[in-house]
Amino acid sequence: MTRTSTLIPAPTEAVALEPTRVAVSTVIFTLRRLADSDTASVVLPLVRRTRDPHEDQWALPGGWLDVAEGLDAAASRTLAETTGLAPSYLEQLYAFGAVDRSPTRVVSIVYWALIRPDDIPDESDENVRWFDAASLPQLAFDHNEIVGYALWRLRNKVGYSRIAHGLLADEFTLAELREVYEAVLGRRLDPANFRRQVENSGTLIPTDHFRTGSHRPARLYRYNQDVELADRGPLDTRH
Amino acid sequence: MTRTSTLIPAPTEAVALEPTRVAVSTVIFTLRRLADSDTASVVLPLVRRTRDPHEDQWALPGGWLDVAEGLDAAASRTLAETTGLAPSYLEQLYAFGAVDRSPTRVVSIVYWALIRPDDIPDESDENVRWFDAASLPQLAFDHNEIVGYALWRLRNKVGYSRIAHGLLADEFTLAELREVYEAVLGRRLDPANFRRQVENSGTLIPTDHFRTGSHRPARLYRYNQDVELADRGPLDTRH
């Protein structure tokens, strides 16, 4: 071993002294109908890694926290840089910090977001691809576990908030709303029961507009804007 | 300015290159009845800071994340080291990372916990004191904001989970349960309405035991253990 100045730490010391680093990642969901299916699926974009660790594997969009930016800003920036997406709704999900989740020590602050299919730009980047959340390949790091947790939160949230609105246009039919719930919950819902529950909930306002097409006209609804999309509590004012 | 070796960065460079550090803090609530009051209050322990920044101000118990420990472990360790408390229920709350929340860049992963009054050890440490959550002094860093967010989550959680159990003995009267809700929600509840709602919820099981004392005997209840105390979803298995 070459002896150098004591001011320069030996390689093993350098590793031991390497600090914990902070990254941000975002799980962003939308709905996509497969060409040969009458049901929609929850899908999310993944980015192919171009360097080690996990080179060529798919990973959540994200990056390092800059020392001069807040967590929310870092999530928005890294999502835009990697995928071009700019969702209106972005919420902190959880901090993942298991010691062995990466070869170096990385705490990842994970955000999640919903985006409407119509708000996804058409750009194509061969290193970004949308995957069905229910059938993912082996992802880099602990990202399968992170997506699983985000799906669990999404399923919980559709039950007690207007979160489904983040996947719908401003006006929608009850069939379209039911399709969101079916995709998120992963099971079919009885149309008559669903209609009754939604109409009794008081969260929807019927409009005078109808969706016309190959079926009989269906009334369009919108959400009651007096109710918050998803109550984040006092942190809502921190942006 | 003294010229030194170029291997040693000048002070301004050192500051600029200082990495983001990760800390953990815990908000731990219990109930306390004031001697001259017939209502209970939500209280939490704070630790007096013995060094800058914010020397002598009160702060949440916590400390630095060790490079070789997970986030949950760090929260438990730093809580025990600063307060001696070892709650059975500890949940990640939120990551606070505003750029200006500390003189250096610190991302703080905040946990929250509930502890039963009977589980608090008697030790006295002059640098640890319990404060009424509703009337805190100016705390160090952004800790007032953090406590406010934790209180908001606590109030939300009592509404749809068995979280109140974390503040009660295994068997309790309906009056004791109502006292928890009143302290958390900060308002009086009608005893007859409360009894009806709780009995209809199916989460309580009446026992054959009664609390006797100066009032007429009151039946003791316990929570239905088939229901999770608070569903953390897939992350529950990560310990």
Image (cartoon, coloured by chain):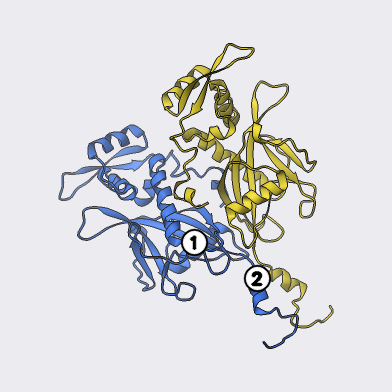
Chain colours: A yellow, B blue
The quadrant holding residue A83 is top right
Q: Which residue is located at x 27 percent, y 44 percent?
A: B173
Instruction: Kindly identify which residue carries mark 2.
Output: B16
Q: What element carries label 2?
A: helix
Going by the numbered disc 1, the residue's amino acid type is Ser
Q: In the figure, is residue A32 to the left or right of B39? A: right
Residue B172 visible in the current orientation: no
Q: Mark 1 Cα within 10 Å, few/some/many (few <14, many 20+)?
A: many
Mark 1 = which residue? B25
Vertical position of residue A147 compared to residue A21: above or below: above
Residue closest to the far right: A2
In the displayed structure, does residue A12 sit left or right of residue B135?
right
- Amino acid type of the residue tagged 2 in the rendering: Ala
The disc, 2 or 1, on the residue closer to the chain's N-terminal end is: 2
Q: Residue at x 38, y 44 (%)?
A: B158
Residue B111 place in picture, x, y as percent: 49, 56
Q: Is mark 1 on a helix, strand or loop?
A: strand
Q: What is the number of the mark on residue B197?
A: none
Rendered position, A63 above or below B209: below
Front-most of residues B164 and B47:
B47
Residue lying furthest bottom: B2
Question: Residue at point 22% right, 61% down?
Answer: B35
